[in-house]
């Protein structure tokens, strides 16, 4: 049996190793949510920044829920492999910036103690949109979210991300320690502003003095992150072992492209991320973020819903269908028409680059993975730009196709009768809305348009557009072969 990846010595020459002395590195960042995206994006960027400019910016990670990733990282002394795949082959980079892994439910007091440490100057997070506890209808705190309910009731023993941030900042204020910078890296529009609003709404309910201190002293930079990261498979682990000579149960795989746009507002320093290819420190991230959400993520969702109901397992397979690839390109250009100019970006070139990335044969990104949590993703990816397009006289046809595809996916059954789980935090509501309605485009779209807080009135009140959605949904219900619209 192959030895586990635990040290940097004796690895295969095909593995690229960290270009710094890991034994001298100290922790400066605590990251919440050490999932695949963090390991393919945040940690490699930080690893490269340390290699270029040094600094005590080692990362401790903490899982607020499941323990498997943290346990695998602990078993490997924080080491893991990032595989970079393209048509020319696969390369392996061993990442050394993670120094320790925590599992919050096992030792919540230990995690809170780490949040007090003055050496930890950034608390970053990739916890997924649904973990924040925000109400999509208002953008504010969701007072029915289980974590928010629990943490408001017991602020000193938190279990959710907002509760941990607030308690950590509160302890630092009480002890006269400078605040850390909360850094959201999740796919939320204006993620820093959203996080700030949630933290301040939370503290306004429990501690007005802490509320004022956070508002005056704590920056919440927004970020835009972009790197396609499929779920790890047995092939991931096999290739990591082949290229490193060690068993690696924390390995991830990703594409060569990587981009990170970060608002440069930090309370107490940061790594030299701007010295790493693909990172850009800016004053305001919104233009880049909107571009990515509407052009990349919107097209990704369109392809995922159409692809999954059409029997395609991976996005790369969907892109083999010339009609669907052309539809994605058409949608990207429709999305581009809703954007203001983006500094340094040619949107036509960006669309062409996205098409090539989606078609990358080395990346196995499952349509089912991308399709999950649709009610969390649709507003910023599709519904907001559709509203703007209609307001400017555009027919918003590709948005109608995408929404119809989501509604067809929400039925939870392929044309051959195969059932599948609708992985969405509002799956129960969706199922209840369409349980007793006829399986027609008109009936199902009318029911789903009433899902509270999802569709804006400007869309549901636009008769021509809702009819277009209904008509396209009827086509998808009648023909799972994905006719060309």
Image: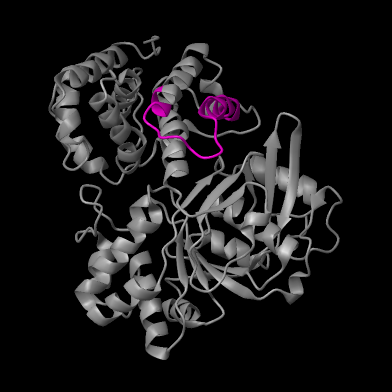
**Left or right position of 166 against 349:** left
Location of residue 76 (image quadrant) = bottom right
Closer to the camera in the image, 44 or 181: 181
Residue 325 percent coordinates (x, y):
50, 18
Is residue 435 visible to us here? no
Which part of the image, by quadrant, shows the C terminus? top left
Q: Which residue sits at x=74%, y=61%?
A: 52
Instruction: Say above or below: 58 vs 254.
Output: below
Is residue 153 visible to us here? yes
Instruction: Say above or below: 148 vs 349.
Output: below
Instruction: Say above or below: 399 vs 134.
Output: above
Closer to the camera in the image, 169 or 301: 169
Q: What span is in magenta?
A: 334-358
Location of residue 49 (image quadrant) = bottom right
Q: Residue 340 magenta-drawn?
A: yes
Residue 207 percent coordinates (x, y):
24, 79
Instruction: Say above or below: 315 vs 105.
Output: above
Magenta-drawn stretch, dominant element (helix, strand or loop) = helix
Q: Which residue sits at x=30%, y=39%?
A: 379
Q: Residue 250 magenta-drawn?
A: no
Which part of the image, by quadrant, shows the N terminus? bottom right
**Left or right position of 460 against 17:** left
Counting labels gives: 0
Closer to the camera in the image, 296 or 319: 296
């Amino acid at each position: 049996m192959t030895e586990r990846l635990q040290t940097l010595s004796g690895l295969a020459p095909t593995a690229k190793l960290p270009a710094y002395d890991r034994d001298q590195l100290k922790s400066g960042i605590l990251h919440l949510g050490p999932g695949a995206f963090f390991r393919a994006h945040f940690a490699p960027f930080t690893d490269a920044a340390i290699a270029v400019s040094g600094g005590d910016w080692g990362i401790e990670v903490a899982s607020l829920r499941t323990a498997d990733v943290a346990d695998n990282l602990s078993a490997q002394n924080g080491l893991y492999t990032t595989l970079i795949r393209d048509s020319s082959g696969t390369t392996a980079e061993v990442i050394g910036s993670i120094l320790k892994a925590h599992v919050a439910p096992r030792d919540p007091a230990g995690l809170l103690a780490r949040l007090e440490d003055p050496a930890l100057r950034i608390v970053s997070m990739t916890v997924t949109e649904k973990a924040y506890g925000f109400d999509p209808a208002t953008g504010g705190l969701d007072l029915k979210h289980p974590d928010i309910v629990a943490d408001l009731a017991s602020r000193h023993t938190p279990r959710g991300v907002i509760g941990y941030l607030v308690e950590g900042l509160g302890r630092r204020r009480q002890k006269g320690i400078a605040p850390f910078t909360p850094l959201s890296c999740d796919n939320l529009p204006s993620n820093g502003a959203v996080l700030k609003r949630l933290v301040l709404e939370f503290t306004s309910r429990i501690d007005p003095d802490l509320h004022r201190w956070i508002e005056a002293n704590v920056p919440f930079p927004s970020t835009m992150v972009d790197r396609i990261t499929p779920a790890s498979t047995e092939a991931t682990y096999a290739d990591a072992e082949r290229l490193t000579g060690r068993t690696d149960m924390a390995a991830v795989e990703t594409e060569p492209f990587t981009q990170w746009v970060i608002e440069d507002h930090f309370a107490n320093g940061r790594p030299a991320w701007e010295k790493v290819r693909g990172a850009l420190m800016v004053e305001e991230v919104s233009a880049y973020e909107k571009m990515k959400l509407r052009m990349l993520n919107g097209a990704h969702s369109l392809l995922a819903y159409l692809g999954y109901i059409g029997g395609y397992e991976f996005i790369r397979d969907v892109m083999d269908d010339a009609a669907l690839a052309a539809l994605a390109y058409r949608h990207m250009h429709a999305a581009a028409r809703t954007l203001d100019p983006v500094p340094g970006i040619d949107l036509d070139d960006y669309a062409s680059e996205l098409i090539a990335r989606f078609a990358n044969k080395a990346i196995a990104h499952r349509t089912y993975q991308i399709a999950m949590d649709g009610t969390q993703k649709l507003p910023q990816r599709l519904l907001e730009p559709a509203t703007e397009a209609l307001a400017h006289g555009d027919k918003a046809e590709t948005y109608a196709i995408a929404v119809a595809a989501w509604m067809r996916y929400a039925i939870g059954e392929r044309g051959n009768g195969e059932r599948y789980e609708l992985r969405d935090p509002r799956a129960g509501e969706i199922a209840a809305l369409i349980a007793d309605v006829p399986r027609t485009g008109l009936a199902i779209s009318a029911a789903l348009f009433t899902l509270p807080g999802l569709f804006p009135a400007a869309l549901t009140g636009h008769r021509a557009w809702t009819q277009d959605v209904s008509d396209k949904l009827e086509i998808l219900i009648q023909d799972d072969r994905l006719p060309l619209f």
